[in-house]
Image: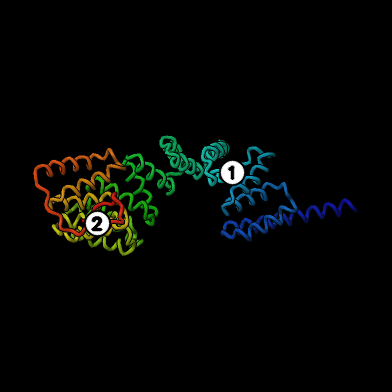
């Protein structure tokens, strides 16, 4: 009789653990981490060596950004079952979250030896190699993933970004377009392809991708930045200014854009508008591009000493900048050939630093 009671109690506990596990996993899939964790911990008190419960707890802690705690549960399983694929998969993810990329890759490689058709983990390995700038290894695993599933958008995403980083532009466009056929909502991919076409001076094609990005996110800074560049490349200077001013409404302290607007005004012959743009930038920072733009105005006005001072300020931190060196050489030659025009501007604030860029 006692044996039957024990058996009944054991069966009841087993059913209880199974029920808790099923409910907890359902909550986990729905992203309800705290509720899932509570049920897994209740099951753990009953069956502390149950691998399904241990994996569940590991997954919860990993997804709650507590990978160190997750490791404890995954490793407890692997101490008894070294080839438990669920523990290996989660363990790799925990190492990755901790920034231990080599250990993550090593663990996932053990996993794919046991489950070679998991293209998702193959893609994760590729992503991790890419993050480490080990591009050839990344490509190998992405292509392995494609052999198993040639329609996975995350593999296309990984390959598109990889080839972009490798400057293999045709391959990057190929896989980015494959991705966008499956899901056109990847704004960063739309702007990436736009950047490639812009780099090739194919401004119309670049605009097509940037505009698609703006339809999804009307104030996307990368798209607005690129559109302005394309308009400038097409000689549509007023349109470039309008686009960049729209970007400044979103990010009024974007000094590079403000310097770009100054450059376009300068090209249009609007020297005073350009000067104001450069002054606004230089009031906040010693921006290289604002200094270079301002120097064009200073040299046009015959104020070579101030221009030369600004070139030297840039070279103090970037001594090998060839553009600056050439412009400095030209300014020195112009200064030698042309008398310096008298400076009628008010004296500088004596409390200011001697190394401030000229804002004349």
Observer able to see residue 86: yes
Instruction: Give the SS element for disc 1.
Output: helix
> Distance of mark 2 from mark 1, alpha carbons?
63 Å
Residue 212 on image: x %, y %: 31, 58
Instruction: Give the SS element for disc 2.
Output: loop
Mark number, residue 91:
1
Q: Residue at the spot x=30%, y=41% of the render?
A: 318
User: Which residue is most to the bottom?
Assistant: 249
Q: Quadrant of residue 347?
A: bottom left
- Asked whether, in this view, residue 10 is left or right of residue 309, the answer is right
Q: Quadrant of the C terminus?
A: bottom left
- Asked whether, in this view, residue 274 is left or right of residue 217, the answer is left
Residue 342 drawn above or below residue 332? below
Q: Residue at the spot x=20%, y=54% of the render?
A: 263
Label 2 or label 1, whichever comes before in sequence order: 1
Q: Residues within 10 Å of mark 1 (few under 14, many from 20)?
A: many
In the depicted view, which residue is nearer to us: 359 or 102? 359
Instruction: Count numbered badges in the picture.
Output: 2
The residue that mark 2 highlights is 348
In the depicted view, which residue is nearer to us: 59 or 275? 275
Residue 283 on image: x %, y %: 29, 58
In the depicted view, which residue is nearer to us: 99 or 315? 315
Residue 122 on image: x %, y %: 49, 41
Residue 288 drawn above or below residue 112? below
Residue 195 on image: x %, y %: 29, 49
In the depicted view, which residue is nearer to us: 264 or 61? 264
């Amino acid at each position: 009789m006692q044996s039957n009671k024990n058996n009944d109690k054991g069966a009841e506990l087993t059913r209880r653990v199974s029920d808790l596990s099923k409910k907890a996993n359902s909550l986990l899939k729905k992203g309800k981490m705290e509720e899932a964790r509570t049920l897994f911990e209740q099951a753990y008190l009953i069956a502390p060596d149950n691998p399904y419960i241990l994996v569940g707890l590991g997954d919860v802690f990993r997804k709650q950004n507590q990978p160190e705690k997750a490791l404890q549960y995954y490793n407890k399983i692997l101490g008894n079952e070294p080839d438990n694929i669920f523990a290996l998969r989660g363990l790799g993810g925990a190492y990755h979250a901790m920034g231990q990329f080599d250990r993550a890759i090593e663990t996932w490689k053990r996993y794919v030896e046991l489950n070679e058709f998991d293209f998702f983990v193959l893609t994760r390995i590729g992503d991790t190699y890419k993050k480490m700038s080990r591009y050839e290894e990344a490509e190998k695993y992405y292509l392995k993933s494609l052999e198993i599933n040639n329609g996975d958008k995350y593999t296309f995403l990984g390959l598109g970004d990889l080839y972009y980083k490798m400057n293999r532009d045709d391959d990057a466009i190929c896989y980015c377009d494959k991705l966008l056929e499956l899901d056109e909502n990847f704004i960063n991919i739309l702007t990436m392809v736009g950047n490639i076409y812009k780099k090739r001076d194919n401004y119309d094609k670049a605009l097509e991708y940037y505009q698609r990005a703006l339809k999804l996110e009307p104030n996307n800074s990368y798209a607005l930045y690129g559109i302005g560049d394309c308009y400038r490349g097409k000689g549509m200077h007023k349109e470039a200014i309008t686009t960049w001013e729209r970007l400044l409404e979103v990010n009024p302290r974007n000094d590079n854009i403000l310097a770009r607007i100054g450059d376009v005004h300068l090209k249009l012959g609007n020297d005073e508008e350009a000067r104001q743009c450069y002054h606004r930038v230089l009031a906040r920072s010693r921006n290289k591009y604002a200094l270079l733009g301002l120097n064009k105005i200073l040299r046009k006005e015959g104020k070579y000493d101030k221009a030369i001072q600004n070139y030297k300020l840039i070279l103090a931190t970037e001594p090998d900048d060839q553009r600056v060196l050439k412009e400095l050489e030209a300014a020195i030659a112009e200064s030698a050939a042309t008398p310096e025009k008298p400076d009628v501007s008010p004296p500088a604030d004596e409390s200011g630093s001697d190394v401030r860029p000229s804002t004349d």
